[in-house]
Amino acid sequence: MTDAAELRTRTREFLAAHPPATTDRADFLKARFDAGLAWVHYPEGLGGLGAPRSLQAVVDAELEAAGAPDNDPRRIGIGLGMAAPTVLGFGTEEQKHRFLRPLWTGEEVWCQLFSEPGAGSDLAALGTRAVRDGASGDWIVNGQKVWTSSAHSARWAILIARTDPEQPKHRGITYFVCDMTDPGVEVRPLRQITGEAEFNEVFLTDVRIPDAHRLGAVGEGWKVAQTTLMNERVSIGGMRIPREGGMIGPVAKAWRERPELRTHDLHQRLMKLWVDAEVARLTGERLRQQLVAGQPGPEGSGMKLGFARLNQEISGLEVELLGEEGLLYDDWTMRRPELVDFTGREAGYRYLRSKGNSIEGGTSEVLLNIVAERVLGLPSEPRTDKDVAWKDLAR
């Protein structure tokens, strides 16, 4: 299906058969997936119609106009933006049919078990081990992961673990789907500077993962992980937002409504950041259009890099603009939220939470290297450990 008019008609017929006002939300979302209107560019039977990605906007517009419920994408962002494209790209048919539907409808929340205390920016140095059980063929996993968003509410996790320590660090890694309800999985909250604990550390003790939950070939987990990471950066830095959406919105609103706070210097800085935010928004639109034709590339790293810088500069300006009010904070209570709400809290929260933007989803330093090497074509940094077996690396 490549015709927008045909897809619009199909969506209207679906809405007539499943009126949003009288259809249970969960039933509506399941029916939408089965009708191929979840993500139209996915194959038939997996929530799509094999249509161009650009036609998703046609479906979304019709559903929004009819007041249809969405799948709460902020709550299940890791599943939608990272797990789903990886399962689609490397999963077996059985895995695709098992995981994609409850992932999209939000019945099953996903998290990401990648970073470790000694392998954050240098993710390929990870030490979590997965050893094959010769009797059953299962994998026994032991290790620790950190900075895991939504681990406390997740049903499944995408996990990379070292299966061959004799290989250099970028090899000998295998990619798995981990059951977060396994008794060997322990989730501990990590309280952040905001007072909340949306992040967690996860301890894996003799966690048994069936080989049927492996994504990609044994030892090729780094290749699979690249798909996840590229999609992660696009989902973080390339989110679709309206003009004055995101962090710049509350600052612009305060500027218009509170003229007593204005100064010439703040005006100059606000104008620059407003333009930067608009450039980032339009660049994100262009990036999404490029995705219609293929897979995300290193440009997503540039978008995520700009997203972090802008959020930190804008939130800093907002605190200065509000003066003493900007120092107020509503609640330091330890909480474990299911999502991050940048615009639903006060300026102090935005200022503190934005500090994590240059760490999560790839540190700004790593992303600068990616942009330099893969976008600008500059020489790569010398890597003396590239061909050294992981077990022989200094730690």
Image (cartoon, rainbow, N blue to C red):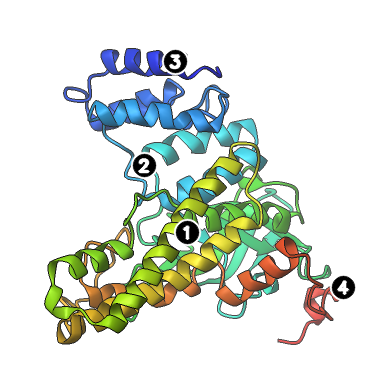
Between discs 2 and 1, the one toward the N terminus: 2
Return the residue nearer the eye: 167 or 58: 58
Q: Is residue 128 left or right of residue 312?
A: right
> Which secondary structure, mark 3?
helix
Residue 280's label in the rendered image is: 1
Residue 106's label in the rendered image is: 2
- In percent of the image, x 42 and y 38: which residue is there? 104
How packed mark 1 is, by other alpha carbons closer than 10 Å (few <14, some 14-19, many 20 or more), is some
Q: How far is the residue under mark 4 from the one under mark 3?
A: 54 Å
Amino acid type for the residue under numbered disc 3: Ala
Between discs 2 and 4, the one toward the N terminus: 2
Above or below, 174 relative to 193: above
Residue 387's label in the rendered image is: 4
> Which secondary structure, mark 2?
loop
Q: Which residue is mark 3?
A: 5
Amino acid type for the residue under numbered disc 4: Asp
Q: Is residue 217 left or right of residue 199?
A: right
Between discs 4 and 1, the one toward the N terminus: 1
Amino acid type for the residue under numbered disc 2: Gly
Q: Is residue 330 left or right of residue 225?
A: left
Q: Are marks 1 and 3 in contact (CB under 8 Å)?
A: no
